Image: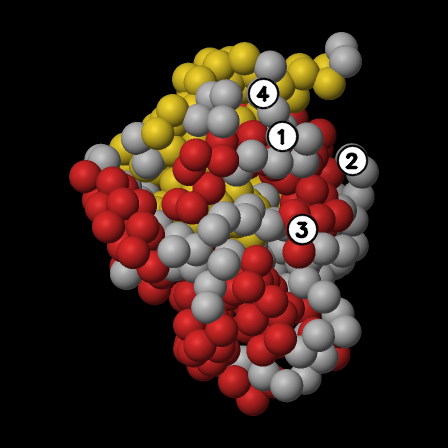
Amino acid sequence: MLHNYVLHVYNDDVRSSTAFAHTEQTQVAIRVHDLVKRYDALTAVDRVSFEVSSGEVFGFLGPNGAGKTTTINILTGLARSDGGEVWIGGLNCTSNTKRAQHLLGVVPDESNLYPELSGFQNLCFCGALYGMRRVARETRARELLSDFDLAGAADRKFAAYSRGMKRRLTIAAGIMHHPPILFLDEPTTGIDVASARQVRQLISEMNQAGTTIFLTTHYIEEAERLCNRVAFIVDGRIVREDTVTQLMRQVEGLHIVEVSLNSGSSEVVGLVSREFPDLRVEKVSDAQLRLVSARPIRAGAVVVFLESAGLEVTEARQVRPSLEDVFVSVTGLAVQEMKRERERMSGGGVAG
């Protein structure tokens, strides 16, 4: 529900003269040092440190349970840390996150708007919680409904929205108060390809307009498209942080071939690995293999071998290395594991 949103008193004079001016003068929008969060014997966030520059899109990537959402909850004041320091917009928020909440917009991984209210009413209600005056919040609500291609559904109940429309309105609600820093938790999980593409475009446009964006996602290709820098987090620890450009240099010269089969075989990985020991063979699904090598791959020879083993190959295609290949290399997590995680999070849907 809406009480999960970060709330603050909206004041036009204070916001324009203090909050935004302070952020513009601060090159580092978010600074985290040795952040720790424990749940009994489990350390969910383990001495995490990073910085996010003003105006960039920073990706926080990792499997479910890695510590992504817990970190966001701490940074936005929804959870308390057990150690470490946090600065938001130059303000030390270690003991009082509310000091910086006027700078933040938060979009959770699941919608928390009221199903019985219309899109317009939901946005206006959010504006009221932010302390916006009636004329200001109604004007802003209409503006966002138009920008997010929801004007035609402004008076429709939120419960009747499609999943993609719900996601767009949830993002709109998070930026009602023009926050200079926006936290997006899994923004395209569980929505269709067209809606996901639209949400990504909205994220790009918000960033181009100057918004600093902290993004968590299971979709590593999404981070590759949107982010300036990314951090890989596994088991509560950051294992690598760099620009997307620098990370991609790690897979320069890598050759990858994806092979699709008519039917799966539990033995196929072992068969190919023994016949072609110079290849790294990954099982993407029961009927799809991913072959990786530092040298050009003789795809034809692999196809002939598979068919001689009684398996029908429907496709063999070369693909370019991606940020996902860097992630797999750095974290050791298998492609198949990440694919299962995406499918679980999307409920079987496609986020594109």
Q: CA distance from mark 3 to mark 1?
A: 14 Å
Residue 95, how many percent across, how many down?
50, 21
Q: Are marks 1 and 4 in contact (CB under 8 Å)?
A: yes
Between disc 3 and disc 1, the foreground one is 3
Q: CA distance from mark 2 to mark 1?
A: 46 Å
- Quarter of image, res 331: top right
Between disc 2 and disc 3, the foreground one is 3
Q: Are marks 4 and 3 in contact (CB under 8 Å)?
A: no
Residue 5, how many percent across, how many down?
60, 50
| Residue at numbered disc 4 | 81
- Residue type at numbered disc 3: His
Nearest to N terminus: mark 2 or mark 3: 3
Quick one: 183 or 124, which is closer to the camera? 124
> On the rendered structure, is 45 left or right of 200?
right
| Residue at numbered disc 3 | 3
Which residue: 52% across, 37% down?
A: 76
Nearest to N terminus: mark 4 or mark 3: 3
- Residue type at numbered disc 4: Ser
| Residue at numbered disc 1 | 79
Look at the image and tell me whether residue 232 can be seen. no
Q: Would you call the spot at circle 4 few (<14 residues within 10 Å), some (14-19), or many (20 or more)?
A: many
Which residue: 38% across, 24% down?
A: 92
Which residue: 73% across, 38% down?
A: 268
Residue 300, how many percent across, how many down?
52, 49
Which residue: 46% across, 42% down?
A: 101
Look at the image and tell me whether residue 80 can be seen. yes
Disc ID at residue 267: 2
Nearest to N terminus: mark 3 or mark 1: 3
Q: Of helix, strand and loop, which one carries label 3?
A: helix
